[in-house]
Image: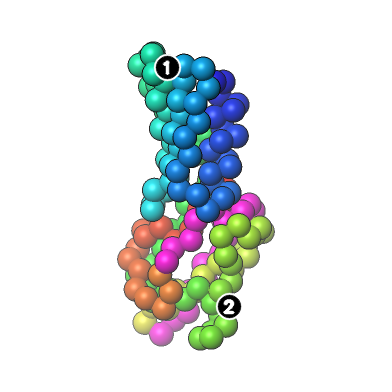
Amino acid sequence: MDLSKIKTLIDFVGRSNITELTVTEKDVTVRIFRTSLAEAAVAEPSQNPDAAARLVSDAHSSVEKTSHAVKAPVFGVLHRGPAPGEPPFVAIGDAVEEGQTLFIIEAMKVFNTIAAPRSGRIAHLTEVDNGEVETGDLLAEIA
């Protein structure tokens, strides 16, 4: 299986709601799964361990290049919507523009707007809403 097919599979898993995909072609099996913090890809060729290490390294590189983590810059209460009862600013799969509001973090009665650092699609969102987040917590990934 060539690297372009593996990258296509990684992109597919990133855009969908599935958490694991296994594909076998000839003597190569590729297993791609998403963890709770970030997407991960594992390749398991059945006969060549050196190829496995190379494929895993390439797959991780492509994930790192295609997604950007949005982390909490401060400790506070995370709000996914503009006000209680309002819909969230973004959902998984939404296209966002650079500078678009993603979240609000309330810290010491100050409301800090968290904006998209780049354009792309939301690949991952935190489950936290109206709850506390720590500085550095992963809030979203933009692919």
User: Residue 109's quadrant in the figure?
Assistant: bottom left
Task: Let me know if residue 135 is in the magenta part.
Answer: no
Report x, y in % for residue 116: 57, 60
Residue 32, given in percent of the width and then of the height, sits at 45, 37
Q: Along the polypeptide, which appears first: circle 2 or circle 1?
A: 1
Q: Amino acid at mark 2?
A: Pro
- Badge 1 is on which residue? 51
Q: CA distance from mark 2 to mark 1?
A: 46 Å
- Tell me where the magenta segment starts and ends, as one range: 109-127
Residue 118 in view, yes or no: no
Is disc 2 in contact with disc 1, using a CB cutoff of under 8 Å?
Answer: no
The residue that appears at 59% across and 28% down in the rendered structure is 5
Is 116 in front, or is 36? 36
What residue type is disc 1 on?
Ala
Q: Indicate whether residue 122 is drawn in magenta.
A: yes
Residue 9 visible in rendering: yes
Q: What residue does disc 2 label?
A: 87
Image location (x, y in percent) of residue 42? 41, 32
**In the image, residue 103 lies at what x, y percent?**
51, 70
The one of 136 and 108 positioned closer to us in this rendering: 136
